Amino acid sequence: MVGQSGGSSCDNDGMDGLQVTETQIASFGKCLVAGASLIVLAFAGAVGAQEQTGDVPVSAADPADAVDLDTLPIPPAPADADLPEVPTIISREELRAAVPELDARNDPALDEPLETIAEFEQRLADEGFVGQDQAGEKEGAESLADGVLSAPLTPADDAAPLDVPALADGDPVEEIGDAPVRDAELVAPLEPIGSFEVEPVQFAEDVNASETQTIAYDVRLTGLEEVDDLSDANLRDMFNDLSVLEDGDGKAQNIAQISARLEQDGELISNILASQGWFNAFVTTRIDRGEQDGGQALAAVIEVQPNQRYDFSAIDVQAGPTQPADLVRDNLALEVGAPIIAARVLAAEARVAVALPRNGYPFAQVGARDILLDRDTADGVYTLPVETGPRSVFGGIETAGDLAFDADHVATLARFERGEVYDSDLVDDLRQALVATGLFNTVTVVPQQTGEEAGGGTQYASLLVTQDEGPPRTIAGSGGYGTGQGVRVEATWTHRNLFPPEGALIVGAVAGTKEQGAGVTFRRSNAGRRDRAFQIVGEALHSDYDAFEAYTGRLSARVSYDSTSIWQKRFTYAYGAQLLGTNEQDFDRVAGERVRRTFFIAGLVGQLGFDTTDSLLDPTDGFRVTALVEPEGSLQDGFRGYVRTRLDGSAYRSFGSSFVLAGRIAAGSIQGIDRFALAPSRRFYAGGGGSVRGFGYQELGPKVLEPNPNFDPEDPDDEDDPLRVRPIGGRSFNEAAAEVRYRFGNYGIVAFVDAGQVYEKSLPDASDIRFGAGIGGRFYTNFGPLRLDVATPINRQEGESRFAVYVSIGQAF
């Protein structure tokens, strides 16, 4: 009795004993397969050799080269394996007698070359067998099992297959090769088409899409109660926002669709938990029948077992020395003992990536983190490699591409000097300043390593500014409306770089119900200094307001240093000079009517500003003050000098994230000239959207009664007043305003009260103050709020409108 399965011999002589086990049969089967494989390999080798050397037969493999399968090792069973006793099925002698010995050396046919299919068929025909048709009367002595011939074999004849000579012409190069198969059905005539029984196709009834059945389901997520208490994030809300089950609104086409959604949401909640530090959470999903009366038929159930939350056990930063020494670690806001939260890790790494270029390391690279989790202790070791690169200072500026201006002008826009420690914020500011010129399609600013030592362990880093100059010409338009000021539309044509660098030519025109004119402006932006502008303006303007009507020509030159949306400055200034020639209507008290007068005026302009607010167009905190002084002289009938002064101040205070309290005061004075000697357009007026809302433009202040040109005394049906009230301006004014602003999203509401008055004397006082009140709406955009205000005068007087409307961009102040 052979009771072990460790034998591995394929030789019949190795079958000792009276019986063979199942294991030995299996082993012998492997030997049969191996032997057959060797036969096939030997046969394939013989055929391949014949194809290479012609018809010379190749002898069988040398017996000495044969593989002895008895020598192939079979690994023993493991020592500690408890294997059952295997019963013997057949003895080796019985197996040897039943299975013939297989030896390729005893079959010479295996060494012969393969015959072609045509030769095979010809041999069968020579032996007296060919295919017969389906109605054949003879039975063949042999048949081929694999269907090479489709019918029993019968004595051959000389006919070509299917009576087609081309299928048996022996031509080796032809489109249709010789056919080895004879099938009479291939040449049998087809049945007449009329003999077929044709039945019309029956189509299923159309399904109304509105009657498509859906399956309703509920979503049940359990096990998050404890997790939600420990996490700062609301995991259930995160799941609801991303869930495909929730997105399906409780409806599906079939259960398979519910199952697919359920599987996807199971993975979703696992990822959400892992992002909050629960890496070993166990999530199960299933579909249950609804339990509550009136509920859905099915319930997609997700059960969560969060298990233990993982914390940081160590934080290892692998970085070179920096200045300051703990620059990387201080900006990596991760602490030992804190939970491993994905969002915090990403934010901490992003902070490091930002801090390094801000502190002199423009070429720093934050590597891929590694967090080694320990399931036994539920903690993780965090490792972050950081390549700081050389500490750098600003070097030179280089330009490339389609240039709008050269490197020297780029340096004018930069707010840093050569040798300063590199700061990526200053590089971003330079990029924004380049974009603000409006001269580029695209522009990039990238630091470059120079390898040049700058001392103190630093190297110079140059900036490569790649420019792609855009179209320099622009056509622009704007419009607005104000009560008393009417509709005003302005259009401009600008060539922004006609006189490089940044020398612009602007041609503009104004059309409106109260104002018409045209002008030409030359402006040099960033003239020798960032945000300093020099401009020369020549314009002709016709104004027709209730206060005055004038034809004015003006030539002025001005230098200004102003705030921009990119760089809002604490201190600003402007200075310049101007010449005016104006022909205006003015009310002559002696004559009791308006008369036309011509004025020639020369003057200087000086302005200073101080600003601590947090925004140029929409401030919420801080204050700003502006002082304007204009020494002027009237040149007609000799020189007569005077001074116009104006002071404006505003303050802002936010309360919470939605409310802002804002206030404004303004006052002005003209010293050294009486009112009648002063051109009407150079006097002070008040009223309007930027002054005292609730009143028309320039409506407040001293007034006169004069004949109404629209009144027809000969028309008995004319209801116009024969007299009208017109403002004549003054030499001083004061104004004040208070607003409460409430913002919700991109919208806002404003309630306001304005006050002010204009006086004939040169110094203002608090007498006869007029008030206006109203409400406004705001729509906030990325360039500032759009403003719509509606106001009404308090204690309205004769000739004043019941309400006034103002539309503009930006806050009122």
Image (cartoon, rainbow, N blue to C red):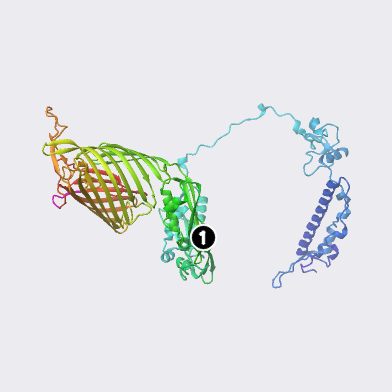
Rendering coords of residue 688 (x, y %): 23, 45
Helix, strand or loop under label 1: loop
The spot of residue 294 in percent (x, y) is 40, 53
Q: Is residue 20 magenta?
A: no
Q: Please give left or right for residue 256 compared with residue 530 in the image.
A: right
CA neighbours of label 1 inside 10 A, class few (<14), some (14 to 19), many (20+): some
Q: Residue at x 42, y 62 (%)?
A: 233
Q: Examine the rendered structure and indicate whether residue 80 appears above or below residue 135.
A: below
Residue 518: x percent and y percent? 31, 37
Residue in the foreground of this view, choosing between 207 and 347: 347
Residue 767 lies in magenta, yes or no? Answer: yes
Of residue 757 and residue 636, the one placed in the foreground of this image is: 636
Of residue 655 and residue 521, the one placed in the foreground of this image is 521
Which residue does the numbered mark 1 point to in the structure image?
363
Taking the spot 35% from the left edge, 54% from the top edge, the residue there is 568
- x%, y% of residue 776? 26, 48
Q: State the residue in front, 195 or 375.
A: 375
The magenta-colored residue range is 766-772
Tell me the quadrant of the picture where the N terminus can be found.
bottom right
Rendered image quadrant of residue 720: top left
